[in-house]
Image: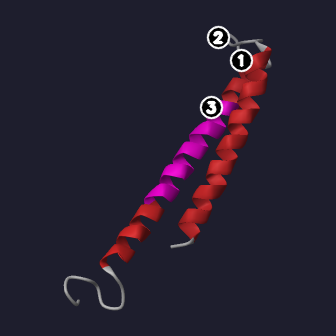
Amino acid sequence: MVNGAPAGGSATGGLRQKETAMSGWFRLTLGLLAVVVGAIWTVQGLGYVEGSAMTGQRIWAVIGPALALVGLALLWLGMRARGRR
């Protein structure tokens, strides 16, 4: 350690790695949640799940897959961020 910084690197290098790892986990979590919610909204919109105000409403059969695609993109970005460590 030189001046409080790890040998061979700067003090902010380790912090950036932690931020990248945290953003990777955050994207993975958010992406997984979006995929699950999107799938639920899709099957509700298609009428396969009963007992909801969303059942049989076509708008949810459109919004659901769109949200699931956003979730897949977030999962992909999260995996990339985690792989760069």
Q: Which residue is mark 2?
A: 52
Q: Of circles 1 and 3, which is in front?
A: 3
Q: Is residue 82 above or below residue 77?
A: below
At label 1, counting other C-alpha atoms closer than 10 Å, the crowd grade (few under 14, some 14-19, many 20 or more) is: some
- The secondary structure making up most of the magenta span is helix
Q: Amino acid at mark 1?
A: Val
Q: Of circles 1 and 2, which is in front?
A: 2
Residue 14: x and y, percent? 36, 74
For mark 2, give the secondary structure: loop
Does residue 30 belong to the magenta stretch? yes
Proximity of marks 1 and 2: CB atoms separated by less than 8 Å? yes
Residue range highlighted in magenta: 22-38
Q: Which residue is mark 1?
A: 49
Where, by quadrant of the figure, is residue 2 drawn? bottom left
Q: Which residue is mark 3?
A: 37
At label 2, counting other C-alpha atoms closer than 10 Å, the crowd grade (few under 14, some 14-19, many 20 or more) is: few
Q: CA distance from mark 1 to mark 2?
A: 8 Å
Q: Amino acid at mark 2?
A: Ser
Residue at 80% in and 19% down: 46
For mark 1, give the secondary structure: loop
Q: CA distance from mark 1 to mark 3?
A: 13 Å
Q: Earlier in the sequence, mark 1 or mark 3?
A: 3
User: Would you say 31 lies left or right of 55 here?
Assistant: left
Q: Earlier in the sequence, mark 2 or mark 3?
A: 3
